[in-house]
Image (cartoon, grey):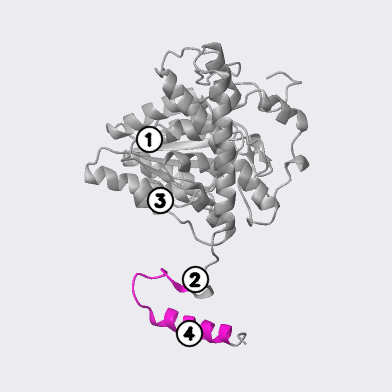
Amino acid sequence: MTADAPRGVDAPPELVQLLTPEGERVEHPDYDIELTAEEVRSLYRDLVLVRRVDLEAVALQRQGELGIWASLLGQEAAQIGSGRALTDADMAFPTYREHGVAWCRDVDPVKLLGLFRGVNHGGWDPAEHNFHLYTIVIGSQTLHAVGYAMGIQRDGAEAATIVYFGDGATSQGDVNESFIWASVFNAPIVFFCQNNQWAISEPLEKQSKIPLYKRASGFGFPGVRVDGNDVFACLAVTRRALQNAREGQGPTLIEAFTYRMGAHTTSDDPTRYRLADELEAWKLKDPIERVKAYLFKNELADQEFFEKIDAEADALGKDVRSRCLALPDPRPEAIFQHVYSGAHALLDEEREQYLTYLAGFER
């Protein structure tokens, strides 16, 4: 990085990259991937549709239809690449921003919006999609994921676990404890850190004095840094790490070097703590545009294809909006449901007291 360059923009030399920001395919000695034209077009479609869902959710929040939203803008390649590396048997543990991974696990986007609209606690079945519920507490899902991975190990299943977290979470005790347990027990897990370089308002240099992927060596397992805006590289690196986990080689830490283009959440104002030139520099690394450039340069798609995807994205946005607005509000007493697996005397008493209180307002 030069002295005049915006912070975090220059790619580190150890970065695994297979597709440049200009859409040029490059080789890497340790990671490679063969993709058909149809597979590349499918990845492009994923990226575009996931971004459209995200933009619609931001608009819904600004219009008062969602309480809050955590945008993935700029991080689509990290999520789609890693998400498409998963097999049906693998289990994913997200934070609250993995909308792209949810897409790859066939979770209806409207169910994600229901959580942020306040009408459910996460409206999907984790066992059905092998995609756990969103975790709001920073870093706690890493311990859950390691425990699940140890269960896979004891069951002798041909599967692995992947857990997502941000650069800020690496300062949490839970994350470091999960590294210890995964290493000592050789758990079949991939730690996928999306280093978007801002833990809300704290820059990466206040989280770590060394590159995050190098922390893995201190716990006794490998780490790798991948271009988080390169969907090819994210797919190749994650696929390799998951396969190693399934084969009994233990955990891997993947640091996806990317950038959060929007706010941390819609309650955040990033203009208060980061510079506009940094944002502009990262726009040139856009994960969607580089795949589009690759498709054009290699004559793997024509203008009709891109127009078709754009039309599909618009239709998806309208569908997500209409179904989100139609989500019914839960009845007040629903908060007492599913707290315990069976009857609970104290909870029953509290429910009756609450219903009596509510009845006092009825006319």
Nearer the camera: disc 4 or disc 3: 4
CA separation, marks 2 and 4? 12 Å
The part of the image, by quadrant, that contains residue 34 is top left
Q: Main secondary structure of the magenta part?
A: helix
Residue 320 lies, in percent from the top left, at 56, 48
Does label 4 or label 1 sit earlier along the sequence? 1
Q: Residue furthest left?
A: 156
Pointer 1 and pointer 3: residues touching (CB < 8 Å)? no
Which residue shows up at 57% across the image and 83% down it?
Answer: 358
CA separation, marks 1 and 3? 18 Å
Question: Is residue 108 shown above or below 190?
Answer: below
Give neighbour class at mark 3: few <14, some 14-19, many 20+ (Cα, 10 Å): some
Q: Can you identify the residue that label 4 sits on?
A: 352
Magenta region includes residue 353: yes
Nearer the camera: disc 3 or disc 2: 2
CA separation, marks 1 and 2? 34 Å
Pointer 4 and pointer 3: residues touching (CB < 8 Å)? no
